Image: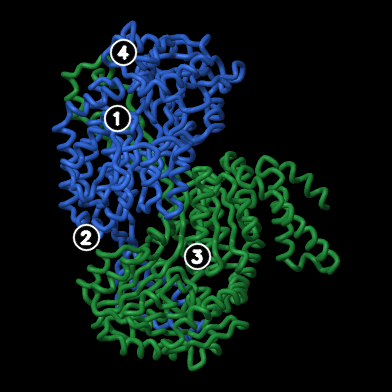
Chain colours: A blue, B green
Amino acid sequence: RVTTKMASMDNLAGDLRKTFYTDVTHAIKWRTTQLKAIGKLVEENREALLEAIKKDLGRSPYESVLGELATVTGEVNYACSNLKSWMAPTAVSTPLAQVKGMSSACVTPQPLGVVLVITPWNYPVSLPLNGIVAALAAGNCVVLKPSEMAEHSSALLADLIPKYLDNNCVRVVLGGIAETTILLNQKWDHILYTGNGTVGRIILKAAADHLTPVTLELGGKSPTYVDKDVDIAIAARRIAWGKFFNAGQTCIAPDYVLVHHESKSALVAALKDMIGKFYGDNARNSEDYGRIVNERHCTRLQTLLEGSRDKIVCGGEVDVPSKFIAPTLVDLGTHGADHPEAAPLMQDELFGPILPIIGVDSVGTAISFINSRDKPLALYIFSKSSSTQQEILDRTSSGSAVINDALMQYSMSSLPFGGVGASGMGAYHGEYGFKALSHMRAVLNKTTWMDLSVRYPPYDMSKLWMLEKML
Amino acid sequence: MLYEVMKKSKQRRRRGGPGGAACWLHRLLGKQLLNSEIQPSICSRVCVRIIYHLSVYLSLSMVDTLASDLRRVFYTDVTLPKKWRATQLKALAKLVDENRDALVEAMKKDLGRSPYESVLGEIATVSGEISHAKSHLKSWMNAETVATPLAQVKGLSTAQIVPQPLGVVLIITPWNYPVSLPLNGLVAAIAAGNCVVLKPSEISQHSTALLAKLIPIYLDPACVRVILGGVDESTILLKQKWDHIMYTGNGVVGKIIMRAAAEHLTPVTLELGGKSPTYVDKGVDLQQTARRVAWGKFFNAGQTCIAPDYVLVHNDVKAAFLAALKDNLKNFYGEDPSKSADFARIISERHCHRLETILKGNADQVVCGGQVDVPSKYIAPTVVDIPYDQIEKASVMQEELFGPILPVIGVENVGKAIEYINGHDKPLALYVFSSSNATQQEILLRTSSGSAVINDAIVQYSVCSLPFGGVGASGMGSYHGEHGFKTFSHMRAVLNKSTKMDLSVRYPPYDMSKIWLIEKMM
């Protein structure tokens, strides 16, 4: 395993800050050049990237293009076309007291300085690169610490990034906990971390020492509600797609399903049907089906599955050495009677190709169930009824929500991508990424040719009303 | 009577549990206390007072589970409708209007501040924030529609960003603006539809006690609570899980708050401070510049987080600037500022002593003022002339002054000023006095600060459309106006996908030859 030498990391933040203060990252030209270079990196090394991802996750090139490479290209293009307007100051209104029309107020974005981006193994190319896009668009220097668990992808990025991007401003650090700790002891101007809540807390505490703001993209169990009277075939198709994409190792994957009892058996049948249509009789033989990232996680999922072995209605095969877990459906019964919340599968985020299905008697029950747990990163609602859709949306909270589909929100650069509560804080993608990694500075330019004498001492209380009127 | 009241409170259990009872009681009695015509006899007054304090005690004993109690209230959805929020905002406006004199009096007791400064610097800013919020609330609460790319079947799908309240927020405020900092925080949190716990500073005793008395009377006591106390009470609060914490104060406590918040993955807004630099260029109207700098500096006796902390003045105009400062100070406060009704006092003897010690370190460089009287918490408006080569070691140039002492340092050129500013923590505010566009732009481009003002000081606070917050050591996040609304909201991405069309190419079994199709549409 390759790791970056400790010595060269000692004061990485400080070194890059010195570069930052040479103002090289400020100009729009530099930023768009870097962004376009990321675009080229992806374009010119497509095969190598797909190969690396396949080695790390056994994922089909189709999913890697759709789910990773295309999203980076999308973010790069979106940033390039909008950067000029993002960088422009936004004028805001000034009240009369500030001598309206003769003063101006605006909000001006400024780079923060040096940003640290720490990413996980499940989308080992897009998560790092989309983070870098946001940081560079905002005019910062960046240090990327990609996951050591996605060995091939991280090594490839560490090799390519210095070839395409400005090496004085963008660095990649390879390593694990030890290297990350060295980095976390330093003073960054922002830290963008994608991963789990346990490490999220560690990052937040380390950031507190330097009063460094953080964006935490965490996870949780993203619920999916399936109503009565839905088009079961479409719901099943989209849920299965969202769930089994990347073998379930997606932070916004539909983690579990709450289905109205009237639709339940039809849904289970339709999901089984879809799995067969997607991956054939034996998913192991399908080119399109991914693998678990490593044996440890595979064993983790296997153990969880054991807790509900008798409830498996589809799949269930596990082969740890080949890191294979079949697309699996688990029928945990009905909420209330069967206590599905007690199942091991219903404790932590699954992050694997196992879909628990729970019957509910009403949308109200589903809402209570969702609200009794941590706020999730995503929430999926399959329903034809606008009032049901609205009821769920109004009475729950989640990072994002999608009606009648799954995962699609990730690729929309116009939508903020982030969590709330335990699923995270802050957001990025598109302009949200630009703003997250900028300081939006308030600038007021006051006229000098008029000066309200009433504002200065010695104060005359009888004149106060005049100033108050103008504020 | 107490029994009757407690029985009635059972009916309110859904809205606030045991704490709700105490608050209802508190509110009822608070109203009684305010309305003195209702209690002709001293005896009944005493009884009411006892019950009042008992209700405060009951409220305090619920501090342990305050966050979860309020979260239960939040989940009854009472704070969601625009009507509730608008009603609360109106009530807050009434609180300020109807108790103006009492508030001004309390601030005078706490800070010796002139009513003019209290109205201008605190009361008017709250009224301003409230009206701004009331007139914009509807548009802030609206979902924002955003563009969807072709792959999401443009025209048949919609994407929106929908603001949602976070839940229960904790607002901790300091003593220097003991009415506006708490209330402006409340405005933002309530506009965003949250339940709020306010922990105002125990150091500004009178203002804080008054707010604690008034808030439960005007605002919905089930949803908005005021907790009095110091470090102990704050610690109990900080152990709990909040959906957002807004803290205004210093960096040391800011770090403690952030670490406590980390346990629960609670996002924070930290309004901190630092030394806000002021650059005075040659070629400016020195009288006007000195007037505005002095006003910004000595307002509230320098105890303003965005006060111009120190001045870097171009060498060519330094002497004239110092003279103009002295002139203006005399115009403001007369020969003896301790006799001026317009000059405030230091909050406490401890802070007065702190400033006295700092001043002693540069006693030889005092060019104006310098008088200190700790028992009356008085420090004269003081100007200290520090030579550039002593800037790093000067006693007055170490930490945020937060007092009426203005260091003035001559610099060779704007470049040297920028160098010094960038060699230190990013400040909360930066002031540039220059008539040259180029100089203004140069400083703005090459430095960073929470906010920046050209040719004036501290006025950015009252512009509701500007975000108010720091960067780096001076803080994270911002509020005021829409920025406050967003700070206390979750901006949820909502995508509504059409079921009419379903691109089969997106599903397995995958056909690599078709992938260009989807890529084109993303």
Residue B25 in the image, given as x and y percentages of width and height: 73, 53
Secondary structure beneath label 4:
helix
Does label 1 lie on the same chain as label 2?
yes
Q: Chain of mark 3?
A: B
State the separation of the CA atoms marked 1 and 3: 58 Å
Does label 2 lie on the same chain as label 3?
no
Q: Which residue is mark 1?
A: A151
Q: Which residue is mark 4?
A: A278
Please say if B340 is above or below A213. below
Q: Which residue is mark 2?
A: A22
State the separation of the CA atoms marked 2 and 1: 34 Å
Mark 1 packing: few (<14 Cα in 10 Å), some, or many (20+)? many
Q: Which residue is mark 3?
A: B127
Which-is-in-front pick, marks 2 and 1?
Answer: 1
Quadrant housing the C terminus of chain B: top left
Outermost residue to the top: A281
Mark 3 packing: few (<14 Cα in 10 Å), some, or many (20+)? many
Left or right of B442? Residue A459 is right
Instruction: Looking at the image, tell me whether mark 2 or mark 4 is earlier in sequence order.
Output: 2
Q: Amino acid at mark 3?
A: Ser
Q: Amino acid at mark 1?
A: Glu
For the point 50% across and 21% down, which residue is it? Answer: A345
Does label 4 lie on the same chain as label 2?
yes
Q: Chain of mark 4?
A: A
For the point 53% across and 26% down, which residue is it? Answer: A347
Instruction: Looking at the image, tell me whether mark 1 or mark 4 is earlier in sequence order.
Output: 1
